Amino acid sequence: MKLLHIDSSILGQHSASREVGNAIVTHLAGTGTDVEVIHRDLAADELPHLTLATLPSAHAAAVPANQLDATQTEARKQSDAVLKEFLAADTVVIAAPMYNFTVPSQLKAWIDRILIGGVTFRYGTNGPEGLITKKRVIIAVARGGLYGSDSPAASAEHAEQYLRTVFDFIGVSPEFVIVEGLAISPESREKSMADAVASVSKLVD
């Protein structure tokens, strides 16, 4: 199994999403199957904001390769590598903190390179159709406050819901491990982290 592990938190060793994401990867890698893990840290190795030059070459609007300069060519290669990694993975684990009610811009830049018309989705007579139907995506979402469906702040949650929309759009039903209430108190953080890590062991291999 090829497992793509995506980190996007800027907090390094202090990151809750990284800790839970690592627990998910460790769990999946310890299942006894032959697991190849590819790790991409979007905070340490940022992707630039999307431009015509950085569109993957598979995109219909991508500038022809012969019109790119050396810098743009390297940026195009980076985008192509991101898309190739995603397509090749059997399982994708994403660690996604919620920053200011949504995902980090680093993660958005990665997403911009995997939602490609004709590759991961297409439009037909019945509307959009996801083309990625045999991939597992597990997402660890970390939130400082309480934003669950029964919370008064639920309508302000645009990280989990955005990611669900993104992957549903390309044909994947993502699985979520949520850790929240991290900023309420040390006790709340400790309990939420313990509950999230414990729930990882219940993931079906």
Image (tube, rainbow, N blue to C red):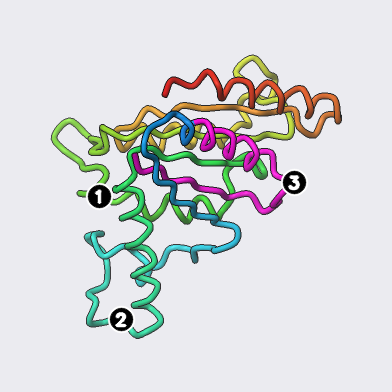
Q: Which of 1 and 186 is in front in this view?
A: 1
Q: Quadrant of the N terminus?
A: top left
Residue matched to label 2: 68
| Mark 1 touches mark 3? (CB < 8 Å) | no
Say left or right for 123 vs 149.
left
Residue matched to label 1: 117
Amino acid bearing label 2:
Leu
Which of the two labelled residues, at mark 1 and mark 2, occupies the earlier sequence position?
2
| CA–CA distance in space, label 3 to label 2 | 40 Å
| Residue projecting furthest to the top | 150
What is the magenta range?
1-27
Dot 1 alpha-carbon crowd within 10 angstroms: few under 14, some 14 to 19, many 20 or more: some
Q: Nearer the viewer, residue 161 or 26?
A: 26
Residue 82 quadrant: bottom left
Amino acid bearing label 3:
His
Dot 3 alpha-carbon crowd within 10 angstroms: few under 14, some 14 to 19, many 20 or more: few
Dot 2 alpha-carbon crowd within 10 angstroms: few under 14, some 14 to 19, many 20 or more: some
Q: Quadrant of the C terminus?
A: top left
The structure residue drawn at horizontal position 65% and vertical position 35%, both measured from the top left corner, is 142
Say left or right for 82 vs 16.
left
155 inside magenta stretch? no
The structure residue drawn at horizontal position 67% and vertical position 53%, both measured from the top left corner, is 10
